[in-house]
Amino acid sequence: MPARELNAVVSERREVNPRLLILRVAPDGWALPDFVPGQYATIGLPAGAPRWPGAAEEENPSPPERVLLRAYSIASSSRAKEYIELYVNLVDSGSFTPRLFALQPGDRLYLKPGFKGVFTLAEVPADQDVVLVATGTGLAPYMSMLRSHAADGGPRRYAVLLGARYLRDLGYDAELRALAAAHPAVSYHPIVSRPEAPWAGPVGRVQDLWRAGVVTDAWGRRPTPADTHVFLCGNPGMIDAMRAQLTAEGFVEQQKLVPGQIHVEVYW
């Protein structure tokens, strides 16, 4: 395969709202390699590809023949072999997402034939519970984890704490509610910071949910470093606030040579 050939196609496009997109990308003529839920894919588009109408004018555009590359967490199940799913927020001034938003089913792009990343459940013992905290599209790796493992059975429980500005930004809300209804091991706790009708749920930041004890209420016990791992994915402000709260409660951040119970991926 020639380097950076446009070797994949958009198989499905779902616009959650004008600034939020779910894309399925299928390889064309080759098989997707295995990946671990939580890993990311690298995709590419020519700098000369069309931009989403209405996007801000691009500053310092690249030569049109150059292939622009970006990494995106995979949202699809690791058991779905026909495509990968991406969850993308539009950045008007960016060079990449306005082009990604312009894609329609059948359009071609580059998909690197290999997936990377260590933001996975690999370091979590099978008998320990998991809290998945996200803002916005930071939910993507958790969707892959839940789609791959929610029905596995076993003692592990999952609590999803998701923050968004508006109800319309909760792109996987219906699926997460259905998952929680179908699987007792999964609980789902969304919160919005700018409520609109018909929202009747909690209002504020996602870290407020942790302070309010929603996981304790769902599980019937307080999560502790001895029995729970906490994943943080999203904007730096949320991650800093959650890291401070968790550290004060005795949780330790996982590092290359230091095992811990806090796992971090910054989306910004």
Image (cartoon, rainbow, N blue to C red):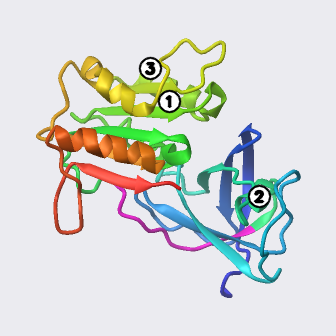
| Alpha carbon separation for disc pair 1 and 2 | 28 Å
Picture residue at 35% right of the left edge, 53% below the top: 264
Q: Quadrant of residue 25?
A: bottom right
Foreground disc of the pair 2, 3: 2
Picture residue at 83% right of the left edge, 69% below the top: 49
Residue at disc 2, secondary structure: helix
Q: Is residue 25 above or below residue 138?
A: below
Find disc 1 in the rendering and name its residue. 176
Q: Is residue 112 magenta?
A: yes
Magenta stretch, main secondary structure, is: loop
| Alpha carbon separation for disc pair 1 and 3 | 9 Å
Picture residue at 37% right of the left edge, 40% below the top: 132
Callout 2, which amino acid? Answer: Pro
Callout 3, which amino acid? Answer: Ala
| Magenta stretch bounds | 109-120
Q: Residues within 10 Å of mark 2 (few under 14, many from 20)?
A: many
Please name whichever residue, 168 or 207, is drawn nearer the observer in this view of the structure: 207
Q: Quadrant of the N terminus?
A: bottom right
Find disc 2 in the rendering and name its residue. 98
Picture coordinates of residue 201, whole percent (x, y): 50, 15
Left or right relative to 264: residue 258: left
Find disc 3 in the rendering and name its residue. 181
Foreground disc of the pair 1, 2: 2
